[in-house]
Image: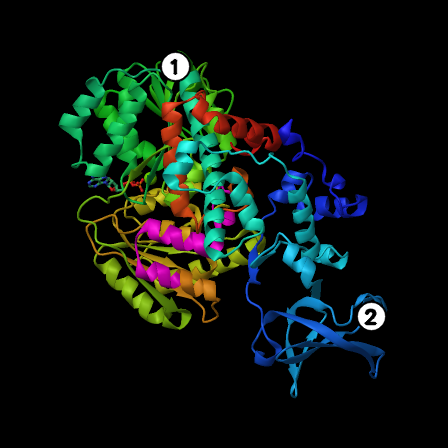
Amino acid sequence: MSSNYLQTPIDYLKGVGPNRADLLRKELDIHTFQDLLHLFPRKYIDRSAYHKTGQLSATNAEVQIIGSITHIKTIKQTKGSRLVAVFKDETGSIDLVWFNRYKWIKESLKINTPYVVFGKVNKMGHTYSMPHPEMELLEDHENKLRSGMQAVYPSTEKLSARGITNRVICGLQEQLFLGLKNELSETLPETLINRLKLPSKKQSIFGVHFPKNNALLSKAQYRLKFEELFYVQMQLIRKNLLRKQKIKGFPFTRVGEYFNKFFSDHLPFQLTDAQKKVIKEIRGDMGSNAQMNRLLQGDVGSGKTIVAFMSILIGLDNGFQCCLMVPTAILSVQHYNGLQVWCNILGISVSLLTGSTSSSKRKKIHESLENGELQLLIGTHALLEDKVKFKNLGLAIIDEQHRFGVAQRSKLWKKNESPPHILVMTATPIPRTLAMSLYGDLDISIIDQLPPGRKPVKTVHRYDANRLSIFAFLKEQIKNENQVYIVYPLIQESEALDYKDLMDGYESISREFPVPAYQVSIVHGKMKAADKEFEMQRFINKQTQIMVATTVIEVGVDVPNASVMVIESAERFGLSQLHQLRGRVGRGADQSYCILMTSHKLTADAKTRLETMCATNDGFAIAEVDLKLRGPGDIMGTQQSGILNLKIADIVKDSQILALARSYAIELLKADPNLETPENRPVRVAYAQLVKYKNIWNYIS
Ligand code: ADP
Ligand code: MG
């Protein structure tokens, strides 16, 4: 019963007729009383102070003054006339001025009656004036709900043009509150409110619309932000828990022959502590009765491949098939070549499936997958085709998952009667706070440590004019038997132009580094897959010293002997892409370099990106800058996530509140997964409402 008031269509609010209702719906997406209540002010004007006319200065922006009108006059101007009301307090006077529609105003103004006026102050000669002031009888002013600070609501041009000014919105909010009885019931458990010393729901909502002072406003905002983030997290975590309850995974109880043999006899290097920790986490997941759904984050070069392979060995040890899916053919070939060596030693059957796999090979793969002979399949999107059927797929790993959509992830789920364990890996460092919101329904592992002995890549920014000295530097590096990448941007809208740049670049490089002393490879997206692989292989085999390429080499490619990454038109790349590209070097023992080439024309943002790259190699620090520069909207994958629908919290600025909200949500759900205790009744009710009215499941993948 009680929530009905808040669900009333906005048309029925006093002061809103059908026209205004239409506008509110169209412009601000306000359909119900509750929507209006959740239209939060974007800022506040201080109206706690009252100015005296005798102490005005030209720098007073917006002030309010108490006084009375002594007389009114109309003054002719070149065009029409203006209305001036002389407004006096005990210290002096100011002119209130209207330039149009003033007939009606003139009639409504009361002489010698106390008013509060509010507006911008202008100074002309020795007189101060206030054009088009907001006016209120002092008597009304004192009876109003509003107090010290005035809310300023989000608006649109159309709204103000049609007379729905901020003042009108304030009036509507007030109207709404006057009709409110006990509908704003508490939505957080009492213990939580007490522990965090939060104001009540009602106090908070009231407090953000009609704040008494800054301190109370902050408290109210904090509570509402906390609540909003708390419920986002509740939904994500609850979804994850439900999945674990509902979907029984295959319990990989054994760590057997394959894993142990590889670990004791064939491990090519000592695992880093971070790698060990992550393998333990994965093992724990796969050994439990629930299905694993885990995100593995690790900066470029942190060594995710070996973690993937050892997870695969556990799957095979338990008699299941496994697959590894990657976004590009180049990368799949590289993984295949790398892992095949170990598979051969251990006696594991492994195949590669890409778009260019011949149909006869393909047929063999399909058969051996279905009869269970094939243990490990590595490949591209080709794995997702319906024809690819496993006998018993137990673990699916997706590398560089940011290149895949959610739809593709879920397709892998369906490759089996009951879904396999899923491990998605990404080198795109997502700031922790964002990851919590985006992937809150996944468990997250992080490799936060690089293999020992890595020298940080030295990064410099150079202009086109420095080209000759850079060529000399590259020759020196090649003389030392190192290899070089030169990457050109390829950005869709200007594709033709970009290809021209790439081909011109390739030509001039070929001229500068002539055969037979030098060999230059080129790889770009328009080449046939087989040609790409051929060129890539020549580079890996050190038959060529220079690789001219587009960003197709951005993901995953691992050539430890490459020591220089030159990025042309670096100002055109985003930060995360630059960081990915730089991650192609610095994988061997030699000092590596990244050279960012640009023209002299740089935007402020481009400068920040370049400076950031030169200043740090830390992917997470870079991701934080990226988030600040671009906002969460442009970061991969956020669009679908609904995180942008936040009404009061800010994912960047309120990251600490988010972390807190998440930890409380976890704690609460651990103790009471189905929200059954009387204590958690408010949460149960609020949660049900969210799902009912917002259809929240739609925007959580
Ligand atoms: P990414 O996380 O970017 O996928 P890779 O798995 O390709 O990184 O590993 C990068 C390089 O580091 C590879 O050449 C790999 O063999 C090497 N590597 C990985 N782990 C270690 C380690 N613990 N010690 C030494 N080298 C390692
Ligand atoms: Mg990798």
Image quadrant holding the N terminus, namely top right
Q: Is residue 324 magenta?
A: no
Is residue 449 something one can see in this rendering? Answer: yes
Counting from the top left corner in percent of width and height, residue 502 is at: 47, 57
User: Circle 2 is placed at which residue position?
Assistant: 106
Q: Is residue 627 magenta?
A: yes
Secondary structure of the residue carrying tag 1 is: loop
Counting from the top left corner in percent of width and height, residue 61 is at: 58, 72
> What's the coloring here?
rainbow
User: Circle 1 is placed at which residue position?
Assistant: 392
Q: State ligand 1's quadrant.
A: top left
Give the Cα distance between marks 2 and 1: 85 Å
**Residue range corresponding to the magenta coloring:** 610-639
User: Which is more foreground, mark 2 or mark 1?
Assistant: 2
Q: Quadrant of residue 90?
A: bottom right
Q: Which mark is residue 120?
A: none
**Upstream in sequence: badge 2 or badge 1:** 2
Q: Is residue 162 above or below residue 74?
A: above
Q: Is residue 60 above or below residue 161?
A: below
Check disc 1 and give the amino acid type: Asn
Q: How many marks?
A: 2
Mark 1 crowdedness (10 Å alpha carbons): few <14, some 14-19, many ≥20 = many
Is residue 524 something one can see in this rendering? Answer: no
- What residue do we see at 59% from left, 30% from top? 695
Horizontal side of residue 199 vs 591, given as left or right? right
Secondary structure of the residue carrying tag 2 is: helix
CB atoms at circles 2 and 1 under 8 Å apart? Answer: no
Check disc 2 and give the amino acid type: Lys
Nearer to us in this view, 248 or 384: 248
Considering the whole magenta stretch, tell me its main secondary structure: helix
Counting from the top left corner in percent of width and height, residue 333 is at: 36, 35
